Image (cartoon, rainbow, N blue to C red):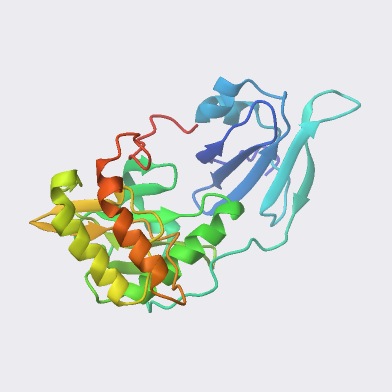
Amino acid sequence: MADYAPRIMLLQAGVDPEAISKFRILVDNKFVKYITIDAGLYDRDDMCFGPSLISLLPPLPPGNWGKGHISRNPKTRDAHFSAVSTTSLSGIMKTWHPTQVDYLKLCEERKLRSNVYEVTCPGFGSTIVAKFARFEWEVPQLEAETMAYGWIEGQHVGPAFLSHLTEEGRVIGFLTARITDYRNATPEDFPLCYLALSKMHKLGIKHGDINKHNFLIHDGEAALIDFDMASRPTNNYELEVELHELQDQLRDTSGRGGQVVESDLC
């Protein structure tokens, strides 16, 4: 066992050459671990390219740890694991759907955003969408969106919520149906978008981010997505203001909220 070399795959990377960089890795196709690396240890390009980073990592510490930190050894000047932690990572607590799917069952097909993927998964007959917290600081955002999906369940406001998504027992995100053959809204789609947003407002829910890229036009209807800013205001004024702003949001040409398809891990 002395020659044992774990199989490591880089799943996600948050690289900052001036500060601590964060990484999510998979070990032996079974265990997800989180690593932070001090600035200045490795070149940015090496940290963004999975095989290069993996070749540079010091040996993984033994034991059932979930988080580890790599810094420069003050004596040898080599990179080493200066700390590891077995503390449980935080997850989404306010779950409501009866179904949970383990992240390791997913097969990623296409990356849409840094934490949004088109995936396939046993039990689902077609491609679906996975959205999840790559790192702990993203958990509150995913928690808020998970709650919002519970508020709109069965109301045909957005894509169908299919399952919570878990990682080693903790909930990190969710799976939704994929809306196919869609396009983003234009000013000419105002009536469809008005109808979709009004439906949400009738439930007493403010979307919170009605940029045109959060309206998907499909089969003559508008569906809303990205509910992480959704709220239940105590009065109708906030709902009225949001509805009043809709036309200007559809006319906006700044690109705010536009889909970002990333070509690499950084």
Residue 133 point in image, percent of width and height: 51, 54
Q: Residue at x 72, y 54 (%)?
A: 63
Instruction: Examine the rendering and report whether any part of residue 157 can be seen.
Output: no
Residue 140 point in image, percent of width and height: 56, 61
Rendered position, 204 above or below 249: below
Q: Is residue 29 left or right of residue 137?
A: left
Rendered position, 45 above or below 233: above
Rendered position, 182 above or below 78: below
Q: Residue at x 60, y 27 (%)?
A: 55
Q: Is residue 90 left or right of residue 199?
A: right
Farthest residue in the left direction? 220
Q: Residue at x 76, y 49 (%)?
A: 84
Rendered image quadrant of residue 147: bottom left
Residue 13 point in image, percent of width and height: 54, 37
Q: Residue at x 37, y 71 (%)?
A: 205
* Screen quadrant of the N terminus: top right
Rendered image quadrant of residue 2: top right
Residue 249 point in image, percent of width and height: 30, 47
Instruction: Examine the rendering and report whether any part of residue 31 can be seen.
Output: yes
Decide which of 174, 200 is in the foreground and name it.
Answer: 200
Query: In this figure, what is the number of numbered marks?
Result: 0
